[in-house]
Amino acid sequence: MIRYNSKEDETFSLNHPELTSYLYFPLANENGVMSSVTPNLSGDSKISQNAFLMPPVSSENLHNDKSSRNFWVRINGSSFWSATGKSSKAQSELFTDEKEATALEAGFMYHKLTRVSKLGLTSEIMSFVPSSGEMVEITGITLKNTTEKPMTIELVSAIPVFGRSADNIRDHRHVTSLLNRIETTEYGVTVKPTMSFDERGHHQNTQVYGVFGGREDEKPRGFIPTVEEFIGEGGSLENPGILGDQSMTLLGAGETAEGYEALGGIVFNVRILKPGESIFYTFILGYGENKEDLEKTAVRFMNRKMFDQSLEETRNCWREKVNITYATGDDVFNHWMKWVSFQPFLRRIYGCSFLPHHDYGKGGRGWRDLWQDCLALLIMDPKDVRKMLLDNYGGVRIDGTNATIIGFSPGEFIADRNNITRVWMDHGMWPFLTTSLYIQQTGDLDILTEETTYFHDMQISRGEEKDLRWNPINRNRLMDQTGQPYRGSVLEHILIEHLTAFYDVGEHGHMRLRGADWNDALDMARENGESVAFTSMYAYNMEEIAELLKALKSKGTDEVLLHKGLLLLLKDGERNPSFKKKLLKDYCMAEFTGEKISFDIEEIINSLESKAAELKENIRKNEWIECESGLSWYNGYYDNSGNKVEGDFLSGKRMMLTSQVFTVMSHTADGEELTKIIKAADELLYDASIGGYKLNTNFNEVKMDLGRMFGFAYGHKENGAVFSHMAVMYGYALYKRGKSEEAFKVISSLYSHCSDFEKSRIYPGIPEYIDAKGRGLYHYLTGSASWMLLTVITQMFGVSGKMGDLSFRPQLLREQFGRDHKIHLDFPFYDRKLKLTYVNESMLEAGSYKITKISIDDEPYINGTSVDLIRKEDILRLDPDKEHHIVVELS
């Protein structure tokens, strides 16, 4: 059972974590070190796909991985004990000896493991990656004699050093070990392969890897720098042969070995521990450009004072970054939301694929991830978001599609991680959703007229043609006729994304599914598939873009300068799919000159509203399903055979949550339809035993004309699992429509399951999905966290920007308030530290109360226009160095 250690911070504890499979914990900094540790210190460490210090692991390696960080202790000259529990005998001892005990404590970016040996030796292993930016992972190990007699100890570390690309874990594993140049130093073992192995063209390697260990007053006695020497004939890393050798032949500093698998095997002098006495050692895994500087960095942390100081700085750094504090009547929810709020930072560091559930490829974030992660940053760390948004729009192509992979540098984009030409039809929708939130939070309408570049590669005409004139010398930027990078406004980018999608339709008048939409596993309906679900959201976005343009017009802007090709896209013509397809083709294949002309804002508004109405009318008229059982909902897809996907079938009812989320969120579903959708979702998709709303019913068919998801076992991943991302968005959509109780049911079901360790088997936080047995999978690196944060703060608590002002529209249920009838939220707004308290003295239910009074620092606040907001200028008058208390009374 997970226990939170205090109300004030995020730390939690867990006894016997090693008895649960698949657990792992992230340790990283923002300079590029990315590690993972398990309850027995398995896991890995890397700085990129091509630079793994430890052997890369997947989720299935975690319970049988022999390549872990390990620390062996010879006790009283005879018995060897693994301080991490990774020995061939450790498991049998664990289950047969009641004296053996293990405990975990963890907080943001630190992990502490405590183990008690039956021999009376206790180990406490603290691991972290310093927030100060050094390219190292630090481990401090404290050994304590808990017996009443003196004890001799001899410490030996055994940390495999992989030192190459993850691709080489199987491909040329032995051949690439022949590149290794291993050296011992005063404090450790360094590895510098001669080259990076790549049959397309080998490169000289400059990366140095190292494992170092020591104390302030003690250097290692010697080293065992290769795996082969350490394990001996017939041995293993969990039962190493060298430990049975009393003499233990060691190398000194300054020696070398070449062409073998490397090991951070570091041996220390025999020490006598008196009863109750303890001793502390530091070990550092690091990356550098040369061994000398790397060792200097490592030695600094062998000072106990420096170790403790760095650990404290790291804790404080991440606590300051996760600057949202929740105080509802449910303490577990408050702590759990702290960890959810931490997850978007992990996504920014790790991308989607640098933790053990790495099925999403070789690192980096995708296009959709980029924009959704910005949602959380807008609330917690908004200072650089404006520049980030401008950089991100540089990934849009002039045909409305975009690069799909984001590089490591701002504004760096890659067409696709697997060099496959494809288009995700939902990608054009997300940038505006994020930009709209930014504008509401800040009131910064001017960002619409800011200019940035376009992405340009060989892929044109929405993935259907190749530009044979494309020249990579232009660094993937679209050039105008003068040979200069073309720059268009953010508004221009947004319009192109939405208008090209409007014309990219299938035979039923909905937008083509193409390579897939949000559900990447709907990837087998490229020719004839249609996404009704996301068509509704594009329509909603067009309405919202029109509203922002009205606000821009009200500030005196009547015309905007845009790419001339938008003349074609903004025109109103025939509604039939053939006409739309031809118009889109004409736009995409027209020679690009970079010419801009002036457009009347009123005409753009009228065109957008007309197009949005057309899309919604088509959906309402043709996609509402009424089953014989009386259940009703919206069909969200057409398969590659051109057939509706959802409804009553011989194999059973087919319903997809995604279809309902976006028709509800976009206001395509009217009030009566909304009620019916909720009823159908509760009956067909809800399962409280696994966290709530499943992504779809069981189609009982391998639909080769729709997507790979139907090849997955039902109840797993995209085929019928509780997919946190879409479940949270369902809750968000219901809140948006004022269905507070139903929305809370969605959020509460998911939270209650994830926070119950006996059911979810994960550390605090939200996973990507919950499988058929209730286990949380793909933890930490999921867009679900950003959407949960957004939903809880802007919808449940009702705290959000409204064209730069601070608005309060809570939908908190009576049961969420504490015994004092209050609920609190600490959050930043315009760099001011705000502590919000809602007071519900009469304990009214959501929908029954309204805001009657606001006070700031005990002074009544009256803005003269609206009782439910604080004006931007009044927020900016507050002292940025103080915490300010806002009390909102509900009655």
Image: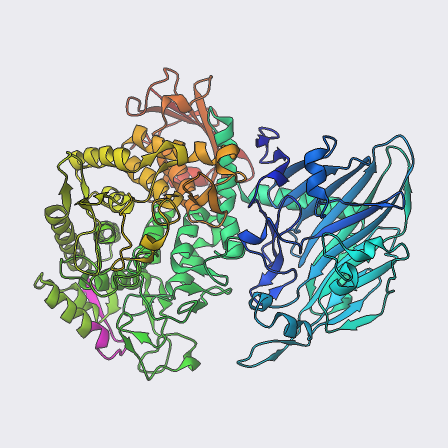
**Considering the image in quadrants, where does the C terminus appear?**
top left
Residue 869, x across and y down, in percent: 35, 34
Q: Is residue 590 magenta?
A: yes
Above or below — where is 372 with respect to 819? Answer: below
Above or below — where is 430 with respect to 677? Answer: below
Tell me the residue at 39%/64% (across/down): 404
601 with respect to 878 (left or right): left
Residue 859, x across and y down, in percent: 45, 25
Q: Is residue 364 magenta?
A: no
Count the numbered circles shown. Answer: 0
Tell me the residue at 79%/71% (across/down): 257
Which region of the structure is painted magenta? 587-600
528 with respect to 348 (left or right): left
237 with respect to 798 (left or right): right
Quarter of image, res 190: bottom right
- Residue placed furthest toward the front: 234
Say if residue 809 shows up in the picture.
Answer: no
Residue 22, x across and y down, in percent: 55, 46
Say if residue 582 shows up in the picture.
Answer: yes
- Residue placed furthest toward the bottom: 469
621 with respect to 296 (left or right): left
Closer to the camera in the image, 642 or 388: 642
**Considering the image in quadrants, where does the N terminus appear?**
top right
Residue 143, x across and y down, in percent: 81, 41
Closer to the camera in the image, 517 or 601: 517
Q: How is the image coloured?
A: rainbow
Quarter of image, res 580: bottom left
